[in-house]
Amino acid sequence: MTTLLNDAEIEERLGDLTGWTRQGNEIRKTFQLPSFPSAIAFVVNVAFLAEAAGHHPDIDIRWRKVTLSLSTHDAGGLTQKDFDLATQIDEII
């Protein structure tokens, strides 16, 4: 089982990320892309990262805006998996 992070650990890890915010038991970020096709391409790239990690975000696509939400559902909250995937996502944008 994956270990849940406590509030201090979550805040520390959020400090290492840009633009991600905590909302309850998830971290979330909205990405603004130059066009709808580029937003879809970004989502496809996120899908490959998520599949490789075995950890899948909730994805909301609104024209050129893509909002990603990460939480380790089977653990019931935030774990290192969420922050690792967030870091990988930020690296591809």
Image (spheres, rainbow, N blue to C red):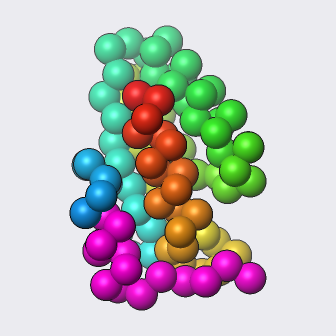
Apparent side of residue 30 relative to residue 56 in the rendered image (left or right) = left
Apparent side of residue 17 relative to residue 26 in the rendered image (left or right) = left
Residue 42 can be seen, yes or no = yes
Point out the image quarter for the N terminus: bottom right
Give above or below for 43 relative to 7. above
Residue 9 covered by magenta stretch: yes
Point out the image quarter for the C terminus: top left
Out of 14 and 23, give the one closest to the viewer: 14
Q: Residue at x 67, y 79 (%)?
A: 2
Residue 23: where, in percent of width, then height?
34, 69
Give above or below for 25 relative to 17. below
Apparent side of residue 74 relative to residue 68 in the rendered image (left or right) = right
Q: How many marks?
A: 0
Q: Quadrant of residue 40?
A: top right
Q: Residue at x 73, y 43 (%)?
A: 52
Give above or below for 59 relative to 23. above
Apparent side of residue 34 relative to residue 82 in the rendered image (left or right) = left
Residue 36 covered by magenta stretch: no
Span of residues in magenta = 1-14
Q: Quadrant of residue 66?
A: top left
Q: Residue at x 52, y 62 (%)?
A: 82
Out of 2 and 39, give the one closest to the viewer: 2
Residue 22: where, in percent of width, then height?
33, 67
Residue 62 can be seen, yes or no = no
Q: Quadrant of residue 76?
A: bottom right
Out of 28 and 52, give the one closest to the viewer: 52
Q: Residue at x 64, y 39 (%)?
A: 49
